[in-house]
Structure formats: C-alpha cells, structure tokens
Image (spheres, coloured by chain):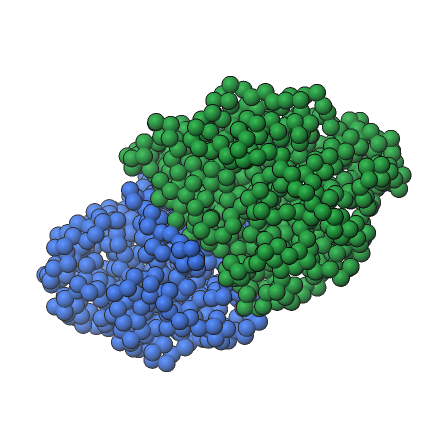
Chain colours: A green, B blue
Amino acid sequence: MSSDLEIAQSAKLRPLTEIGEQLSLSPTDLEPFGHYAAKIEPAKLREAGSQRGKYVVVTAVTPTPLGEGKTTTAIGLVQGLGKLGKKVVATLRQPSLGPVFGIKGGAAGAGYSQVVPMETLNLHLTGDFHAITAAHNLLAAMVDNHLQHGNKLDIEPHSITWGRVLDMNDRALRNIVVGLGRKVDGVPRQSRFDITAASEIMTIVAQSADLPDLRARLGRIVVGFNTSGEPVTAEDLKAAGAMAVLLRDALRPNLLQTLEGQAALIHCGPFGNIATGNSSIIADKFALANTDFVITEAGFGADLGYERFVNVKCATSGLVPDAAVIVVTVRALKLHSGRHKVVAGKPLPPELLEENSADVEAGLSNLAHHLDIVRKSGVPAVVAINAFPDDHESEHQVIKDFAASKGVACVVSTHVADGGEGAQELAKAVVEAADQATDLHFSYEPEDSLEDKINSIATKVYGADGVKIEPAAAKQLARFTELGFGKLPVLIAKTHLSTTADPADRGAPTGWTLPIREVRLAAGAGYVYALAGAMQTMPGLGTHPAAEKMDITPDGRIVGLF
Amino acid sequence: MSSDLEIAQSAKLRPLTEIGEQLSLSPTDLEPFGHYAAKIEPAKLREAGSQRGKYVVVTAVTPTPLGEGKTTTAIGLVQGLGKLGKKVVATLRQPSLGPVFGIKGGAAGAGYSQVVPMETLNLHLTGDFHAITAAHNLLAAMVDNHLQHGNKLDIEPHSITWGRVLDMNDRALRNIVVGLGRKVDGVPRQSRFDITAASEIMTIVAQSADLPDLRARLGRIVVGFNTSGEPVTAEDLKAAGAMAVLLRDALRPNLLQTLEGQAALIHCGPFGNIATGNSSIIADKFALANTDFVITEAGFGADLGYERFVNVKCATSGLVPDAAVIVVTVRALKLHSGRHKVVAGKPLPPELLEENSADVEAGLSNLAHHLDIVRKSGVPAVVAINAFPDDHESEHQVIKDFAASKGVACVVSTHVADGGEGAQELAKAVVEAADQATDLHFSYEPEDSLEDKINSIATKVYGADGVKIEPAAAKQLARFTELGFGKLPVLIAKTHLSTTADPADRGAPTGWTLPIREVRLAAGAGYVYALAGAMQTMPGLGTHPAAEKMDITPDGRIVGLF
C-alpha cells in the first residue's frame, strides 16, 4: 500500500465551491485560503439556524500509545455515509505541528480515509494555531510587561499561571527562567512553555458560540492573583481586545474535503488531557444546521474525550448527539488483556500480531467499560472494529459476539484499505442507531459542588470507588468556589492509557481511588481542571524526530510527511 | 484627518484579479488567501524573465525615533506614478506583529498612501512570519533535542548561537535559562528569544533566488560549533528539509494593493540592525520582469538599509537600481542640528515644530552625507521632502536650495494628505532620474578580507576615520575566514539614529573611529555581521502598549489598530 502522503497527493480534489454547496454555501460565502481550503464568511456562521442533521460522535476504547484510528474511522464513516447517498460532513480537530514533526508525521486519517490536501491540513492550514499562539503570547508579554512597569494591579509573581506557548515539541521549554539580564530585561521568575494545543485559548475558540462570546471569554482568562488573592484577568490587563483582534478569523471553521469529496470542517484542536479534546462548537452548529449527518470525534477513550463531549461541549452548546461510535481494535483489546507491552514510538511487538482470540476476549472488559459510559449518557451506541491487515477473523468474531450479548450493533470497517466502500456497513449501523431516541444524561449538574463533580466523574465514568483529594487541592477547590467558579464543569486530567489514573492499568479495574493532587482554573474556557497524575503539556522529540525524514523537491513537492 | 485605519477601512478595494493583471498574472496564477491577498503560483515565479522595469529604491536621512515615512513615501510614489499613467508596483516589507502591538499600532504607509487591507497586512497576512517562526523554532528544538539524546555531533553547548524567536515584543524572553526540571526536561543552558524579524531565516527567505536556493541556505545555517571548533549546521542536524517544508509557501510573495489600486508585493521583513532590512529578491525580480517601475524601500537611513541594498541585496540578485529616492523631513533635519531632543514613544517637543529654517540648515550635513552615500554608489538620486502639516514653506526652501546647490532633484511630496495626487512631482522627478545611467559601485569586493570590508563600510559609507576591532572580534574574523566564510559580505550592526556608532551623535560627524566588539556568522543568509554597539534583537513593550487600545466590535470590525 502507498504511504498516506502518496495517496493524498495522487487524489483528484474537487473544486472547493462544489464542496461548499454541500453546506448550502455559495462561492461568495467562502473566503479561500489557498485553492483547497476556505473559511466560512462570518455572516453565514451568524445566521446558521437550528439543528437539522443527525449528530454522531466517534469515541474509542482506551487506546494503545499508537492510537486506535478514531479520526480515520470518523472520516471513513463520512465516506461510507456518502456511498449510501447521505448528505454528510466531518467536523474534526486540526493536527498540531509539534507531533507532525515529532513522532508521527502528518495525520488526518490514514490510507483511503483522509482529509485533503494532507499537506495543508498538517502544516499551517489557514493559520488558526499560529493566531492562537500569537494571542496567547501577547497576553504573556503583557503580564510580564505589567510587572516591569510598576505592577499597578499588584500581581503576586509566584501566582502567575499564564505561561507561553509554541506549536512545537520542545522539552527544553517546559521549565524556564525568564527575565534574566539587566533591569530593562524583565523581572526574573520561573515560567514555562506549553504546546499551543494546551493553550486555554485553544479551548476558548473551540467552546465559543460567536465573536462576542469569544471576546468575553478572553476577558475572563485568569492569569494569576493579586497579593490579596483576587484573580487578575486578561481584561484587567487590557489585553483581551487585542487578543480578539488576533483571533477574529481563527474563530471561523476551515472547509476542506475528504478523499471522496465530502465536506470536512477542520477547527481547533484542544489538548486531550488538560482541555476538552474536542473540535469546535461553532463548526458543529453550522454543519448541523446545513446537512443531514455530522460526524465529529472526541479525543482519547470515552472516559476522557467523550465524557467532556457530553458534560462540557454539549452542555455548553445545547446540542444533543444522536449516536456514538466506539472504535475498537484487536490490538487494543489484546493489550488490555494485560499480557502485552506496547511502547510509544516503537513498533508493536510481533507476538501481539499473532492470531489470539483468547487475548482479545481477555481485553473485552475495557470495551465493556467504554460502552457502559456511552450507554449511561443515554446515547445510542455502535461498536466499530477498525480493521488492520494483521487482524484475524476469529478475533473480530470475539468482539462481535460480545457486542451481540450486549445488544449493540458491531461492524468491521475496512475504510483505511477500502475508503468509503469499506465503511458502508458501519454507515448503515450508524443510520439505524441515529434513528433511535437519545435521552441525554450528564454526569453531574452545574449546581453540584466542584468536589461532587469530581466524584461523579470518578465513580460514574471511570469506575473508581471514590476520590482522594489532597489537602492542597481541597483548599484550591474551596477558593475557586468562594471566587464564584463553583458552577463551572470539571475536567479531570488523567492518563489516557488507562481507565484509571495509572497508565499501567489494563482492562477496566475496579476497587481503586482517584487521587487529585492539584486543581487549576480555566475561567475563560469555562472549566476547572483537577490533576490526577503528572500531566505533560509540552511534548518532547524522540531520538529521531519525524522531521529528519522530511524534505522538499526542487519543484516544491513535499516528501516524508508520513 | 481620519485615522489610518479609518481611511483604510473606508477604501473601496479592487478585485485582486484586476490587480494581478498589472503583473501579467491571470486569475489562475493567484492563490488567494482571503479576498484581498494572494500568493503568486510557483510556476509564474520560476518562469519570470529578466529585468524589464526601472528599479527604484527609497532610502532616507538618519531618522528620528519616529521614522521619516519611507514606506509612506514609497507607496505615495507608486500612487504618483500611477497618476502619470505608469505601470508600477511596490515591493515592500511585511510589518512585524511585535511593534504593531507595541509602540506604533499598524503601519503600512499612512493617511492616503497605504497598502490595503490594512488589517490583513498588519496582522497575520498569509502566515509567512508564522512559518518563519515555526521553522526557526523547529531547528531550536532539534538542537536541544540533540543535546538531550547523546549529542552525537559533539556540540559544545556554550557555542550554540541559535536561539528561538517569537513575533512579539517580549523583553522577558531576552535572557532565559531553558532545560530546567528533571532529566527528561532538557539540558539546562542559557539562551534567548529574538523577535521573528531578527531570525536568520527571515533574511534567508528574503535573499533566496528560488526553492532550491532556500533549501541549500537552510542547510548552511550554523547553529554552533563542536568541541573541535567546527561549525554544526542545520543540515548536520537533519533539520533543513523539514524547515523547507514549513517555508515552502512563505517563499512566495504576497499580492495586495495600494489605496489607489496599484499592485503591492509584500514579502519578508528582515530586521534593520543585524540583518539586511530589505524586502525579498524574489518579489523584486518578479516585479521587474513584469512591469515598468518597481519601487522598493530599504530600512533606516542610507548608511544602513541602502548600503545593504547595494552591497548585499543587489550583489546577490544581480539587479541594478535605476534611481534612489532619499526621504528627508524637516523634523529630522532640525533634530540633526543637535539643538533638539526626541524620545521614542513620546510626542515631538513643541519647539521642534515651530518655524525655524536655521535649525533645518544646521541639520543639512546629515542629508549631504546620505546623498553622498547614494552618489558614491553610482545611482541617480532624488531628494523627497515628506511634508508634514506642521512644516513651513521657508523650511522646505532651505532643503530645496541645498539640493539645487548639489545638482540633485528635490521635490516636496504631500502623499500622506493627498495620495498619489500629492506625489506627482516626485514621480516626475523619479522618472527623469531613472532615465539617467547607473554605474553601480559596491563598497567592497568579495575578495577583500572581512577586515577590509568592515573598514570600507566604516570609512566610505559612515565617514569614520577608521575601525578599532577588539581582539576577541579579530579572532572571530580570523576563524570565520579560516572556516571558509571570508568571501561573504559584511553587515555592520550599528545604531540607526546616527551615521556614527553613537546614537547621540547628530548631523554627520567626522574624525571618529568605529568600534567593533564582536563578530557573528549568518552562513545561511550569507553574511558576517559585526557589532558596533549593543544591538537589541527583542524589543520590549512600553508602559501602555498599543494593544491596550485595540478591540473588536460584535460584528467583527477591528478598532484601535492605529
């Protein structure tokens, strides 16, 4: 099989005006950025009506470090629905430059289920991430500049939580000291860079309903506290207006296409651990008002991205999903048997690829757990087996039998090898599921205390017995509540490699307690996040970064981008 | 008079396809980025023929900290030539985001001589600066990552000269320590951030003839030295290919338009002190092959930007300028009398605005000096008085009389208030000057030693008696020569506020010696630069940054961007 890049480069793309028609967009409703990407005109976004299409979210079991192909399955499903003659649009996250040059090269699906142009998508696209980087760093510069020029807001320097961001995997920037040198060179203090996907602004753009909402959220960003313990905001620093100026166009979704010519709205890419891990509300709303099926995806397993999709994204947007697809792979279930070890950045161990339905069976507890999360939320589920070339029929059968025993549809999908053709059965199952009624249940109510919210997610979603909140974290929760942030939803920053807080745990363990060591505030994005383990917000590069293999030919063709 | 932004926002823009026709570009030769900015298709850039148009460079006297309106005059001249019915294109630098949010707000001309859309130009444009930032920081991450993973190239950490960049005025990043934390968080060392305009990659893009040249230059970047003292390059780190991937589109100039509908190619913006301070060769070449007049500008006074325009930009491109416009203002000459003090970021002192032709007369030595620089280079000159509302007729007359005594054309231009109408006389003078023959003289030959090159610039261009090279700098020069970099041109990083190395000096002092304390290498950009004073490569924000006044209306209109 050809590489993803080769498949993408040999694709015959359709004129974007044709793609726009799928969303009732006339050529003048599109602002082109290059020949095959465009932003939607603000007026069209403003006048988008109410939900008309079916809203389908793609989630997954607890992934291996290699990922289980959620994006690929989402794109395959879109192409599969296309084969059935359905009007369908994908709403997906934009890939981050850091990982593109780090571990994995480009990523926007795989094989014959991709969004194209692949290079545009994986590199700068229309500049949204760059705009978010700039807005984030403008605020950071204004924070340090405020300290420099007399600190009239009386900011306590050690309380500053606002770092800087770059869309790069750069471990050397995780812990830095800034402001060294002479008096004119700033106030020395310890700080950090995160990757842009971890910027609160990334989630702000993803969660904003419109431009005034974006502007208000930017103003609410808390950068730290004054010496009396009161929050200091971006509005206090008079930075929010200029940040909105930088972000005006980044709030508009980007129109691209799948390999088979369906519209794909690519917008935002919040980190999956400390942020929502979901693409934008604005893109979903617009798509749902203008087509029959909208397929989106939620980062990591159902315990993380899907939980936030329901409790944060849908709770904010008011949108109600009609179906959820749970992606499962044979390799993931084998890993969840606890009998194999997979290391990020290294090939899968050969014994994991051998036919072994007993291992698959032993890992079913993980699928059961994620299915349970989806069912408890009241959304009709479909299990999609993302087929790999080294899978065996008998292994697929184990999963199918399990699904049958649970009364849930389960389909093998070969969209990577076969494109939409290979996802037709999945598409049919999704159409059926989406015709069933949704009775959306949130895991908690806004009125619940922050502690109760954490407890609800831990017990109802993760399957923990309870929560152990460290005294320092409890104090922070009390303080956030006192400051009026008690009604915000709560995210739990937890490993994505297990349903528990320990990345080494496999399957779906019970009888454990979720430890919360620290709590942080994202007042602009609109949530409080509790840390259950050390969360990395700036990835590093490996010994041989993917960048080493990339190059450009004299006539401008990109090579080595996966 | 309305603000620059108001004038720009009320302008009626022409379809960009119409603008493209001025450069023989059909609609399919343009890749749109938004409705009113486009990149030129690579094929058109590749097939651009030889120089057909007249090549005019706009330079200036030694500026006040407020600048003397070179960009404005260049745009006014383009519009003035337009009024005369000439086919004319502006080739200008892209503004940097840092200063936009810092001191001055947006800037792309002023009043009725602007490039539009002003917001597009001053904010992200088509993302070139962001791409340069990303490519620069990818290399930085790969340098630190190399130290992290065993340092096979044996890089001596203290020799690393490659920092990181952001397009932001952020003084706290001038001196930082990176790599703190645990073992997995990098190797601790001191480093820095520069503003993106100071990135060597900015000059590389500006100086590159085409994509293969860009790729080769990226590979030649020296990031530091190994423990044997040999240079370590981006090619050695296997980073140059991926950097070229990020920069592929940034190498293509951006098409915008003036307020009066002439084409403007906006491309690159290298810093004026440690870099060339000139827009791209690729844009000039393309424009010169496709129109009758091309107006470009060179940063700061003739001692800096113009000297580099001739000795670095033209020496590289092989292009020969047909005329040079020296912009002069009454306020600048008054300042050069040595009788006034102007402070950056503060309004001009009222006494400087009072009628005082004696002060203007006393400052003429500065104009004489810059005129001399241009004449020595063999390029026909025109003096353009950029008129301000508070100028007086008698003051203009002093400048005119002086120019007449030197036998050089001198015209008052009111393009800021009147647009092209106000620059018609200037346009006529430029047409005449450009019909005279150029006998281009470089200040030195490639074969001259690096020391001799420095000496030539100091004595022939700056008017110094000689050069005093500190022992450490002399050692560096010997080392660069030994390593094979002796044939490169030399830039001298010197204050732009005086013809000497002391920013307090006014007029055009003689009888002084240029001190060189350090020499650095920009092997990818293709020059050695000698520091004659402390050079700031990361600006700071003032007490009240321009950003504080910016905002966005609910319907998306930008306000406060100057």
Find residue A523 and report its horizontal and vertical position in percent.
47, 37
- Nearer the observer, B530 or A504: A504
Q: Quadrant of the C terminus of chain B?
A: bottom left
Residue A18 percent location from the top left of the image: 65, 67
The residue shown at (28%, 64%) is: B2
How many discs mark residues in the rendered view?
0
Q: Which residue shows up at 42% across the image and 55% down it?
A: B554
Residue B174 quadrant = top left
Does residue A155 appear left or right of residue A137 in this picture?
A: left
Residue in the picture at 13% in, 52% down: B339
Is residue A316 something one can see in this rendering? yes
Residue B470 is situated, as x and y percent measured from the top left of the image, at 32, 39
| Left or right side of B556 for B332 | left
Q: Is residue A156 at all visible to an observer of this figure? A: no
Query: Residue B457 occupies which quadrant of the picture?
Result: bottom left
- The picture places residue B422, in percent across and down from the top left corner, at 27, 73
Which of the two residues, A52 or B3, is positioned nearer the viewer here?
A52
Q: Residue furthest top?
A: A471
The outermost residue toward the right is A394
Toward the viewer: A485 or B401? A485
In the rendered view of the protein, which quadrant contains the N terminus of chain B?
A: bottom left
At a point 70% along the width and 64% down the height, the residue shown is A12
